[in-house]
Amino acid sequence: MRIGVSESRLSLTPPTPSIPDGTTPRERFAALLTELREVTAAVADAQFWTPGSTARAELTDVVARAVHALGYRGEKPKKNDPPLTVEALKALLEAKGGLPAMTPEVTVAVEQARESMVVKWGPVELKADQRRKRLGELLDALADEVEVRPGPEPLVVRRHSARYNTTDDAGYARRRCQIDAHPWLARGVRCDVVADAHGSAARAWVEGELDVEVLRRVGVTFREFVRLAWKFGANPRVYLPGIPHGFEERQGLDHFGNDLRLVPGGQSLADKGAEETRLLRACHLVVDANRVSQVKPGTWSVYTRSEGPPWGTALLLPGLVAFEWRDAEGRVRTKAVYDVGEPVAGPLRIDGVVCEFDHDTKAFQEKIDRA
């Protein structure tokens, strides 16, 4: 189907494309994509505001003929000026988007002509648009099954302009592209994010435009979008201001891009925070709380060091604190694993012995030593 196709063809809902049995998802995707492009052109062809469309041309012709029958002579006709020809009226309608200085009779004629065209072309556009939306849904559902073929050159799949009204518009455009590219990487597609003239572009090394169309339909869920935004260092509400307050907590996400539902025991955000605090406390006591130089929030890792070698590193795992000292050359000198209990909020346990927290650090350290 092309722009300018006859109205009789457009008035019928196009059938599902004939796809032979046994074809691959990639072949089915290609057939559906071809029809989508044809139907998209058909939608435009049935719209009055599309330059060059059949609907626009017919509307212009009907209005021009109706006005010509009333003897319209232009905006400021002279006494002996003849009525404008139909072709002259068409040119005026296209140039001005209407007719200047219309009399009440001409105004009524124009409105009647327009209404008749709306009645004729409205259903045509509606049917074509419904088919277009249905084809889009079929392509979206099929995209995950389609083989994406690698190619020798990167092709742009998505672009995002740096227009977020923040102090880091370029950064937000880049991170938005990173979110787009994340599911492509999961499919083994080589891709990157580069700066372009207006923001950033997400590129993929794929065979051709069919693969680009597939990747454009491979996305993430709303929950995953929010998680990835935080993971890449962006506030998701810059992209989607309507995200309700407390969404992350209800969905088991933190503000560092961690999925708390993956934590054993299915902890809530509050429970996870309490557990992390408890493990930090255990680690500080086991290692040396006064020499902690960096704590990485939102993970199970705590990095510790003394003022000089040997260096110490503690890794927090669900229910465990794994600790090792390294010398100045990086060789492991000692290792220790401390059982601090199941990963739920509760009292600290060292090697299975419950140790209630005491603000008296010395007394609490003696409990640990005895354990």
Image: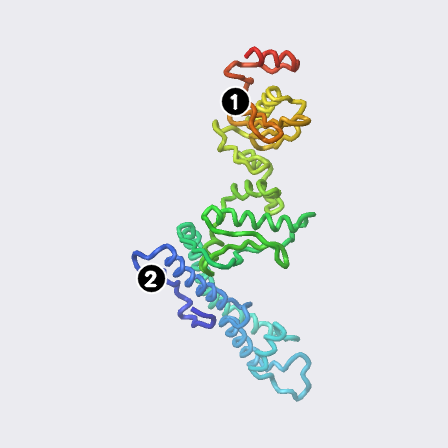
Question: Which quadrant of the rendered structure holds the C terminus?
Answer: top right
Residue 146 position in % (x across, y down): 40, 53
Report whether residue 275 is seen: no
Q: Measured along the vertical axis of the image, is residue 261 above or below residue 341? A: below
Please name the residue shown 57% across and 78% down the image: 90
Please name the residue shown 59% across and 79% down the image: 91
Mark 2 vs mark 1: in front: 1
Q: Measured along the vertical axis of the image, is residue 314 above or below residue 359? A: below
- Horizontally, residue 168 falls left or right of residue 5, namely right
Q: Mark 2 or mark 1: which comes first in sequence?
A: 2
Residue 338 position in % (x across, y down): 53, 20
Q: Label 2, on which residue?
A: 18
Residue 218 position in % (x across, y down): 47, 50
Residue 315 in which image quadrant:
top right
Residue 227 position in % (x across, y down): 55, 40
What amino acid is found at the position of numbered circle 2 in the picture?
Answer: Ser
Rounded to the nearest whole Å, what is the CA distance between mark 2 and mark 1?
64 Å
What amino acid is found at the position of numbered circle 1 in the picture?
Answer: Val
